[in-house]
Image: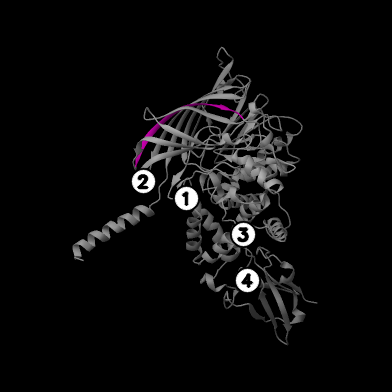
Amino acid sequence: MKKSVAIIFAFIISQFQAQQGAYYQQSAKYRMDIDVNAEKFTYQGNQTLEYTNNSPDELNVVYFHLYWNAFKPNSMMDQRVAAQGKNGDSRLQKDGISRLASIPKNEEGAQNIHWLKQNGKAVKFEVQETVMKVYLAEPIKPNSTTTFTMEWDAVIPQQIRRSGRNNREGVDMTMTQWYPKIAEYDYDGWATFDYIGREFHAPFSDFDVTIKIDKDYVIGAGGILENPAEVKGYNTNAKIKAEKNKKATWKWTAKNILDFAWSADRDYIVKSFDVPQGPKVFFVYQPNDKTKVWEEAQPYVTKYFQIMNSHFGKYAYPTYAFIQGGDGGMEYGMCTMILGESKDIKDLMGLMAHEGSHSWYQQMLATNEPMRPWMDEGFTSYAESFVMHQLFPEKLPNPFTDKLNAYRSFIKKGIEEPAIWFGDHHDNGTSYSYASYVKGELYLVQLGYIMGEQNLSETLKQYYDQWSLKHPSDRDFLHIAQKVSGMDLKWFHNYWIYTTKTIDYGIKEVKYEAKSTTVTLVNNGQVPMPIDFSVLTKDKKVVTYQIPLNMTHTWKTKDGYGDFKTMLYWPWTQKEYVITVPYTKDQLSVLGIDFSQRIADVNPADNFVEVK
């Protein structure tokens, strides 16, 4: 090959590789006009959507989500719930029978698309239950914008899960995933996940939403209310502007969020307060004896946001709303829908802390939830445990003790499923919860143990700095963790996320000698780990010996749980390890693996020896 041709060819290859590897994200701008018939629980919708293709690919089709089409008998969600029976999500079934099967015809969810146009030209579309495939009138070229207009009507479904009418706490309308929402497109292609009941994914978008509804209603939403003086609940001096048919008009805007959610009820009250350095927080709920604990929440929520802003990165938006949506808890852009009734402030704050933390690990760091639910739910659960330990301190070895114990108990059931599975494709509801929430949380706990808490904290901060308001993957997070720690961590990621193998170390033998003590440690599990081995002397001194794992190739140099001495590494292929400490039997009180009790050892009973 001639030199000049080779140079040109190399240049083309490098450009192709650069293009394939370059990060991009799509964007959208919604403008909606919504007219609600509160008596019939229906609405008319009109939508203009500007969609920008920032990818290097030419798009010939696009997809929209029509989530409410799932709420009817014999839908895919109903079929999945029926097939799983009592092994499925308990909120979707009663006594093992799907609740969707008995939805009356007039309360079935529906999103009926009247027409859809691209740049003014009618386009063909095909509704595949909760996914709508649109055949474009003209391709959307890279780095170009197209405009979709559409008209539709919708029936607000019976409240089964997250969305719907007249839920169990008496909230009239919980309007979540309620509009035709364009699907995310990235390097993995279109995120056309059928709605079976679990998670969501979407491009960052701007919203301009006008809602007409009976003037007696109060709306809570994730966004900025542009006309608080013209509607009920947000301004004591409001002069409600209503049409002849007694409808008030609400105008909401939001920028760079994943979705726009709202809820409406005649009995809502609205309270607000400012967190120092942001955000402005709204409580929207029904005041009664079962919700009176909300009155105690302001100082806790204020401290919650301050801790989150300091440790995990600053909340990016001007407002956040906690809204009584009447069904568990579910996060949305700049708001969450949660149960309003709580037994005490700790119960309420646990829910608020979890759902609020999704603003970091789902909204700002917008991972693909259906594909990697453990990054969303697990990282959120870690933040929840971290903050709750500070809001409600307990004498525990670490903030994650309860989750570690729950994990150990669950493992004994023998029904664990890998965290790598798609959220809706877990066969057992409890297995999904542990794979996504618990193992996702313990992923970070184990990393803190492996590379040191300071390195984990720095990793989480850099993760936020580099990827907030983007769509990161586990590969992106792992890259930062390895860079911060200097360690190879791919082995741990593979074991913990892709398998159901477990950690099980123990003390096999202790020999007391004239001037020292020799301890034989054994790996009885399938997941290798570095080991922090400690001794407690009779004079209450703790000495820790770090036994590195050879696969990390770099050893941790500091940890928030005390100083340590570094020993020779333990090869992952080696079953046993012998360590000699310069203490005699009469100098020792306790010998043990991991005094901090962070390691997710499934059988910790043999990790400690009391010297008698």
Q: Residues within 10 Å of mark 3 (few under 14, many from 20)?
A: many
CA–CA distance in space, label 3 to label 1:
21 Å
Residue at 61% of width from left, 59% of height from top? 445
Which amino acid type is shown beneath numbered disc 4?
Ile
Residue at 38% of width from left, 52% of height from top? 22
Asked if the stretch drawn in magenta spans residue 146, the answer is yes
Q: Residues within 10 Å of mark 4 (few under 14, many from 20)?
A: many
- Disc 4 or 3, which lies upstream in sequence? 3
- Disc 4 or 2, which lies upstream in sequence? 2
- In the image, 461: left or right of 509? left
Instruction: Return the residue nearer the eye: 419 or 107.
Output: 107
Which amino acid type is shown beneath numbered disc 3?
Val
State the mark number for residue 445.
Answer: 3
Q: Quadrant of residue 399?
A: bottom right
Indicate the position of residue 321 as horizontal and vertical percent values: 60, 35
Quadrant housing the C terminus: bottom right
- Observer-side mark, 2 or 3, equals 2
CA–CA distance in space, label 2 to label 3:
39 Å
* Mark 2 lies on residue: 57
Which span of residues is magenta-colored? 143-156
* Mark 4 lies on residue: 531
* Mark 1 lies on residue: 467
CA–CA distance in space, label 4 to label 1:
32 Å
Q: Residues within 10 Å of mark 2 (few under 14, many from 20)?
A: some
Q: Residue furthest bottom?
A: 514
- Disc 2 or 3, which lies upstream in sequence? 2
Q: Determine whether label 1 and label 2 are within 8 Å by CB.
A: no
Q: Determine whether label 4 and label 2 are within 8 Å by CB.
A: no
